[in-house]
Image: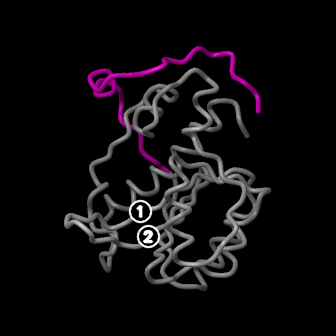
Amino acid sequence: MTESSKEYLRNIDKASIDRLPNIVFDGEIVVVNTRAEADKAVKYLSGFKVLGFDTETKPTFKKGQNHSIALLQLSTDERAYLFRIKTVGITDNLLALLENDKIIKVGAAVHDDIKGLAKLRKMRPAGFADLQNVVPKYGIMEKSVRNITAIVLNARLSKAQRLTNWENEELTGSQCLYAATDAWVCRKIYESLGNS
């Protein structure tokens, strides 16, 4: 890992974040609804060394209620794939990608995401990088992707769609953009810190 010589803020407050310009993914967003589409997506994604990674789960508002992962996002700089896990499941090819230690999947709090995926299919995940473990090496003490984005990319990440229903039959354009941005921004932060 190349340590960047740039000085970063240790922490940032909400007022400072609110003054920053909004950041959104501006590449192609592909929603994956079938196993054939999943295999095609994995073939494309396997050509990259670093991918942005995230998952989305339908929020719970009742005590004791739990939902399994509805969406898995993997992103390059140009294209974000949104795998409808509820529909497609974790295909053999997707599993192989999640277990491939040569392809780095960058996310935040990835332990929780991996735990959720492992409930759906037995796996030996490899090649994951958690921003929460990476950024302290650069003096950044923040844990949330929103705050890390503000410090490293000098931009504001919207969290407006976080509590929407990720199990809807059709995802809205806003949901797709939010989900794609969440995965892509992790990759962008990782590379901006001098990792590739």
Colouring scheme, one of rainbow, by chain, secondary structure, one colour = one colour
Please report whichever mark, 2 or 1, sits nearer to the chain's N-terminal start: 1
Relative horizontal placement of residue 167, taking residue 122 as reference (left or right):
left
Q: Residue placed farthest to the right in the image?
A: 102
- Camera-nearest residue between 193 and 126: 126
Q: Is residue 46 above or below residue 149?
A: below
Q: Secondary structure at mark 2?
A: strand
**Neighbours of disc 2 within 10 Å: few (<14), some (14-19), many (20+):** many
**Residue 167 in picture, x, y percent from top left:** 33, 75
Q: Percent position (x, y) of residue 170?
A: 32, 76
Residue 165 to residue 196: above or below: below
Are the two marked residues, 2 and 1, in contact with CB atoms closer than 8 angstroms? yes
SS at badge 1: strand
Identify the magenta region: 1-26
Find out whether residue 193 is within the magenta segment: no
- Residue at 68% over, 63% down: 125
Main SS class of the magenta portion in the image = loop
28 left or right of 46?
left
Name the amino acid type tagged 2: Ile
For label 2, the residue is 69
Nearer to us in this view, 149 or 123: 123
| Whole-number angstrom distance, CA of label 2 to CA of label 1 | 6 Å
